[in-house]
Image (spheres, helix red, strand yellow):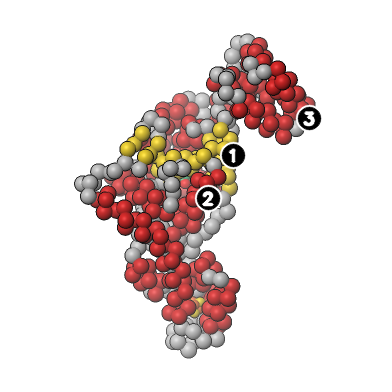
Amino acid sequence: MSPQRVLSGMRPTGQLHLGHYHGVLKNWLKLQNEYECFFFVADWHALTTDYENPQLIASYVWDNVIDWLAVGVNPGSARLFIQSRVPEHAELHLLLSMFTPLSWLERVPTYKDQQEKLSNRDLTTYGFLGYPLLQTADIMIYKAGFVPVGEDQVAHVELAREIARRFNHLYGKEPGFEAKVLAAAKKMGKKNNLLYHDLRRNYQEQGDALALEKARAMVERQQNISIGDRERLTGYLEGSGKMIFPEPQALLTKAAKMPGLDGQKMSKSYGNTISLRDTPAAVTEKIRTMPTDPARVRRNDPGHPDKCPVWNLHEVYSSEDQKNWAREGCISAGIGCLDCKQPVIESILKELAPIRKRFVASFPRVANRHGKWPVKLWMRCGRLLV
Ligand code: TRP
Ligand code: SF4
């Protein structure tokens, strides 16, 4: 049981952009200071939809890791790893598949949704159906307590909970369970033994969730009991078998939707992104050439922010004062569109500057090693040391 452990993965499907930064990475930066974090490149997950381009995925793997480091993900605090270098992910996925009913996978909403959305690809594959089960294996291997996800992935964490429960139900049973639990509880000492049974009774008879939490924490704190006894003591609180895998919880992240250059959500497939690696000149050019309210043909034509994608960026980056200035200037034709864009350009450059600085500082070192990485990969435990 590791209730304070967070696990999160990202599929390497392209260059990281401001959408990733606002939607995922900023949250990781916060989490890495608050929890024990495991962050990984989900390259096998990328393969479920892009199986025709494995080389491309392989190249994005390292690009993504570089960008994580550049934004400030700290390998001294969070563990970073690459899914495919830890073959146990595939192994557990296989084992879980033995008892996972097909219907559980078929009813996960993303299965049908994504098939419709990515209709240019054939996703009636076994691998794609198993996508959330592979994700379940990712989570279960590390016994993660929390999984930061957006709204669309909550159903995947829900599946992981069901699978963990089923696993515990199937494999947590053993002859003489009750006698073993009682013996294990005694090993915690006289006082703890009594407290353990009191807390369990409070939970089971009165549904006291706090008592359950306290009892779990108490079992977690014990240093002199075996893994088996720990699983028995945790399992006995709620049922009649070992708790081998904890049930993970979704850590819902507020969907910070980053608008793209055309007003739609920023996404590679819309070609409307600002990459974390764009040079200041490229960023400036991209924003200067952004479309604006078509009503503003000439400098003197008034426009309306509601019809302009630049306004969406003001919403993300500008202070109230700045927004009032832009709104009034737009409606009254008091300012031109280039004037209006200037503070947005400056804010984005300011946000990207430290990222770019770290990137430029480390990239030559990387390149000089003839494509080899100055990293040690601890494959078995999945820890990446930079
Ligand atoms: N499915 C996630 C996504 O598309 C990526 C992912 C794979 C993941 N395995 C995970 C996220 C485990 C959290 C935990 O973004
Ligand atoms: Fe858009 Fe600003 Fe031009 Fe108005 S002034 S159309 S908000 S860029």
Name the residue located 58 percent from the left edge and 53 percent from the top edge.
254
Q: Disc 2 vs disc 3: Cβ atoms closer than 8 Å?
A: no
Decide: few, some or many residues near mark 3? Use Cα within 10 Å; few <14, some 14-19, many ≥20: few
Compute the Cα span from label 2 to label 3.
37 Å
Q: Report x, y in % for residue 74.
A: 43, 47
Q: Amino acid at mark 3?
A: Gln
Decide: few, some or many residues near mark 2? Use Cα within 10 Å; few <14, some 14-19, many ≥20: few
At mark 3, the secondary structure is: helix
Instruction: Give the side of residue 367 with respect to residue 350, left or right.
Output: left
Q: Nearer the viewer, mark 2 or mark 3?
A: 2
Query: Which corner quadrant holds the C terminus?
Result: top left
| Residue placed furthest toward the right | 206
| Residue closer to the observer: 246 or 289 | 246
The residue to which callout 2 is attached is 30
User: Which tag, 1 or 3, sits closer to the chain's start?
Assistant: 3
User: Which tag, 2 or 3, sits closer to the chain's start?
Assistant: 2
User: Which tag, 2 or 1, sits closer to the chain's start?
Assistant: 2
Query: Which corner quadrant holds the N terminus?
Result: top right
The residue to which callout 1 is attached is 249
Q: Amino acid at mark 2?
A: Lys
| Residue closer to the observer: 227 or 20 | 227
Q: Report x, y in % for residue 157.
A: 55, 39
Name the residue located 68 percent from the left edge and 28 percent from the top edge.
215
Compute the Cα span from label 1 to label 3.
23 Å
The residue to which callout 3 is attached is 206
Q: Compared with residue 84, is residue 283 higher up or lower down, i.e. above or below?
A: below
Answer yes or no: is residue 64 visible: no
